[in-house]
């Protein structure tokens, strides 16, 4: 069980690192908003993060991840409500929420 949890946490961390790499040269929301390839890459990794968090919650419901349910809900929105995805919301997730998640995942892996 612990190996599976560590794999899922590692997958989340890998996706966050990819998003960091993708967006490191993106200085503003306007840059992000005008680059659909970048948006798609970021959204795909957020989908994977949401799926991994969902799996973690099934295995270990008490896992200490802030807003775990919101992460899963965001994944569901990206998958099922693609036509209502707000680019500004994705940008806020990248800039504000992923750094917190990254810190939590790193702590859980330690």
Image (cartoon, grey):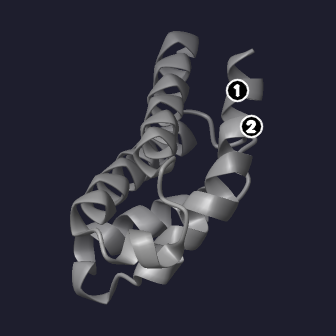
Q: Which residue is the site of mark 1?
A: 106
In the rendered image, the vertical position of residue 25 relative to residue 91, given as above or below: above
Q: Which residue: 48% across, 50% down?
A: 25
Instruction: Tell me if label 1 and label 2 are in contact, CB under 8 Å.
Output: yes
| Residue 63 makes an appearance in the image | no
Residue 109 image position (x, y, % from top left): 68, 19
Q: CA distance from mark 1 to mark 2?
A: 5 Å
Horizontally, residue 22 falls left or right of residue 110, namely left
Q: Is residue 62 left or right of residue 54?
A: right
Name which residue lies at 25% across and 61% down: 40
Secondary structure at badge 2 equals helix
Q: Is residue 60 above or below residue 38?
A: above
Query: Residue 78 vs residue 28: left or right?
Result: left
Give residue 106's quadrant in the image.
Answer: top right
Q: Which mark is residue 23?
A: none
Where residue 28 sits in the image (x, y, percent)?
Answer: 54, 70
Q: Is residue 7 visible?
A: yes
What residue did someone put label 2 on? 103
Q: Which quadrant holds residue 55? A: top left
Structural crowding at the residue carrying mark 2, measured as other residues with C-alpha within 10 Å and reported as few (<14), some (14–19) or many (≥20): few
Q: Crowding near pointer 1: few (<14 within 10 Å), some, many (20+)?
A: few
Of residues 63 and 22, which is closer to you in this image? 22
Considering the numbered disc 1 on the image, is that residue within a helix, a strand or a loop? helix
| Residue 69 falls in image quadrant | bottom right
Residue 80, given in percent of the width and then of the height, sits at: 24, 74
Q: Residue at x 69, y 48 (%)?
A: 99
Q: Position of residue 108 (x, y in %)?
A: 72, 26
Q: Residue at x 55, y 28 (%)?
A: 9
Tell me how many marks there are: 2
Vertical position of residue 24 compared to residue 14: above or below: below
């Amino acid at each position: 069980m612990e190996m599976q949890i560590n794999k899922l946490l590692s997958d989340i961390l890998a996706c966050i690192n990819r998003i960091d790499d993708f967006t490191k040269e993106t200085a503003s929301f306007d840059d992000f908003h005008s680059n659909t390839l970048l948006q798609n890459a970021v959204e795909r990794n957020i989908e994977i993060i949401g799926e991994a968090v969902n799996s973690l919650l099934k295995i270990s419901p008490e896992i200490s991840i802030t807003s775990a349910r919101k992460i899963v809900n965001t994944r569901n929105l990206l998958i099922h409500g693609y036509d209502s995805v707000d680019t500004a919301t994705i940008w806020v997730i990248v800039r504000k929420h992923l750094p917190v998640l990254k810190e939590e995942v790193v702590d859980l892996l330690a």
